[in-house]
Image (cartoon, coloured by chain):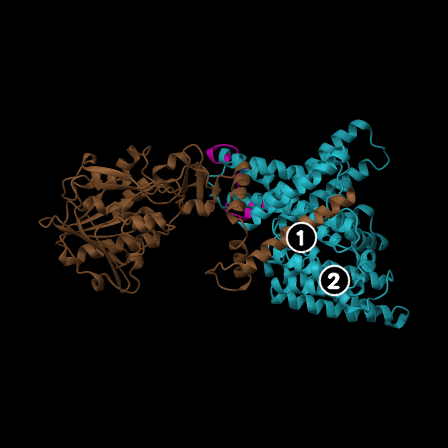
Chain colours: A brown, B cyan
Amino acid sequence: MKKFFDYVTIVIFFAFCIFPLAGSLFSDAKDQNDGGLRGIGDHLKNSFPMKQSWDRLYSVTARTLGQREFYGVYYDEADGRLIKLFTEYDEKKLGRSVGTLNRYKKQHSRMPVYSMIVPTASGIYRENLPEALEVVDQQKLIDDIYYRIDEDITPLDVFSRLYSVRDSYIYFRSDDRWTQTGAFEAYMAVARKLGASPYGAENYDIEFTNVPFCGQLSDISFITDIQPDMIDAYRCKYGSYIRSCSAIRERQIYTKASVYSRGALSNPDKYTFFLGSTDYRSVQIDSTAADQPSILIIGSDYANCFVPFLAPNYSKITLINPAEMGDKKLSDIVTPEDYDMTLFLFDTETFCEGFEL
Amino acid sequence: MQSYDILFMFAFLPVYMGLFAITPAKHRALVMTLGNAVTAVFCGLRCAAVYTLCTAVCYFSGIAIYNMRNNEQRTAMRKALAAGNFCLAAAALVICSPRGVDVSAFTPFKAAVFSVLPLNMISYIADVFRGDCEAQTNAAQLAAYLGFFPSAGYGPVYRYKMVRSCFAEPRPDASKLALGIRYYIMGLAAYTVVAVRLSELHAELLATSAEQLSGGAAWMGTLVFYAGFGTSVIASLFMGHGLAVMQGIRSGHCFRRKFMQPVTERRLKEFNIPLCRWLKDYVTMPLRRAGFDKYAALSVSILLGALWYGFTPGWLAAGALLAAAVTVQGRLTKHHTPAEPFVIIGSAAAKLITFAAVSCAAVWEFISGKAGFALFRTAGADDGFFYTFFGEAVIPTLIGLVIAGSLLHSLVNRMNLRLFKLVLPLAELVFLAIAAAYMVR
């Protein structure tokens, strides 16, 4: 009997050891990692058979042992959401962003310039997070940013509005971005300050795309047993205001008749439903509201799901993503003087990473 | 490449054991040497160079020392050669330590590669010098012993004279192979699941600002350190011992701790038996033969052992505290047979002394880190941090204390072994699966 168990142990152990090695040899998984020991180890991990099941086993075991934070993502069990923690920022980089804003205003002193810093989920749900994590007080940070920017730049506060509706589905449960519901709430808070008449919820039909997904925070933390997220699209009841939507990425231009891209729902990153991608250099939206002003929006991908609400109020909307500008300057891409106003729309974390134009 | 790396378990080990199995027994030392060399190269060219140099120097020095044993005129040269090798061993320890010039053997939670190479060198040269065994003329067997990769972390430390015949023609059978696998799996599970998590918690605590940290959280951190350190050592010993047994290396248990062990000296010995035996053979007994008092020699050994775990003032203090406790307890109970109540009180005292000693090392980590003197703060700071930290740390710490205290070992000894044998394969599979999940993430 003892010998039998011995042979069982030997066979199971070496079969267990060999199986992943064989799997990795026949795997056609392409890794973007460089070579070397780490690259080989990463390849072995990525091509490990049934990797998702092992990841799930890891997350269940870790949570049973009391772990709640996984690589900077906190699992809020009570609310059933994953929150990307924003715990620190570089003061110099933040200063660079503030300086960029102030320089832009100096260069375009006659143009109305607005600044909208959107808190991330880590800021709105800060009370749900343990104090020990020392997450940044984003309300205080945003106030500090608004205090430091040029007084001729109009700050747009959305923190209070988002905080008041924090129990609604304003942030994805497994992604670090906001939903279009959250963007709509922000739009309602700032539309008048932008000089526009807000179109209320009664003007929109909400289309639920019925494509459940678990976002990048699930990939980072290996936690998938939370309620899946769903993209919701706000469509105006009285017809589309969009004439064309052209996204420019390097030398390629993609033109569509809608700001929503159903085909993008098959991408791993479902957020590309808005505008068709998140790595555009610029997007130009022409609306049917020909007699309305034009607006230039410079910001992070938080602007993607905010833009559709502006279509009834602006004849031309151009989005510039500073992270995708590469070596180009703003003046190489657009002429700001062609627009009636400029809006800087960033989430707190991206703003604190610093950007230049 | 450590024995808990994904590359080790799923790439190196199956290929190595396959090669080991198909090689005739008399040539297996070559395969072991190859395994050592591969491990050394993965640790860096510096380690590989040190390993090669030390093996070459030991090989020729050992033969020279052995050949000059009957020549009284060459006694001074023999001693000089031996001393030179000991110095080289010390240099190897410095060079191979992960923090380089910091001269630490290893941090509490990450075993240094080749920290056992210097000890093996000293063991071999000392045994040949004393005439306990012949010099090894087979370079492969010597190289296989010196850089024996299963011991590359915390050990087990093998004395040359006890294992030299095993390296000549290693012949593992199915029962040894299975036993080795069991040890390896248990060690791997304990390390990846418990020890690594405790080290992350400890690092998180050290990174917390001093203002945030309350005294309670800081002292909880010392408990985490104690559990993590104990689990790291025991898990590493399990893995090393398992890998050695799989290759037919015969050795005794690495730890054998009684739950009710009242004598501090024995409690220390049973924590890392191979290391304690090494220290006894090459430090304590030579000092006693040189005329040192028993407890003075023991104190030196304890100090060196503590410094081997971590070359910091904290570990020096730990060693000093343990040495003092062993000396006092030994002298007080010298002529008395411990009565029953003493066993209970003594056991509690021995545990407390061990915890206090390891806490010295933890305190040093706090004081030298950002946490400053939080340990001495009793009130004033918000305890929100403590409750959060407690929530995350309590389960792994308790498991770590069970492992470090060898409670599991004691429980197993008292269990119905027949039932345990049925459950064991299932438990192995579960541990293996969980360890794999942690390695693959």
Which residue is under mark 2? B22
Q: Residue at x 12, y 54 (%)?
A: A110
Residue reaching furthest to the top = B341
Circles 2 and 1 in contact, beta carbons < 8 Å: no
Give the quadrant of residue A4: top right
Residue B28 to residue B417: above or below? below
Residue B177 visible (yes or no)? yes
Left or right: where B325 falls relative to A92? right
Q: Residue at x 8, y 49 (%)?
A: A291
Query: What's the magenta region?
Result: B362-386
Give the image location of residue B130, x and y in percent: 86, 61
Nearer the observer, B338 or B179: B179
Amino acid at the residue labelled 1: Phe
Give the quadrant of residue B22: bottom right
Which residue is under mark 1? A14
Mark 1, Cα crowd under 10 Å, few <14 / some 14-19 / many 20+, is some
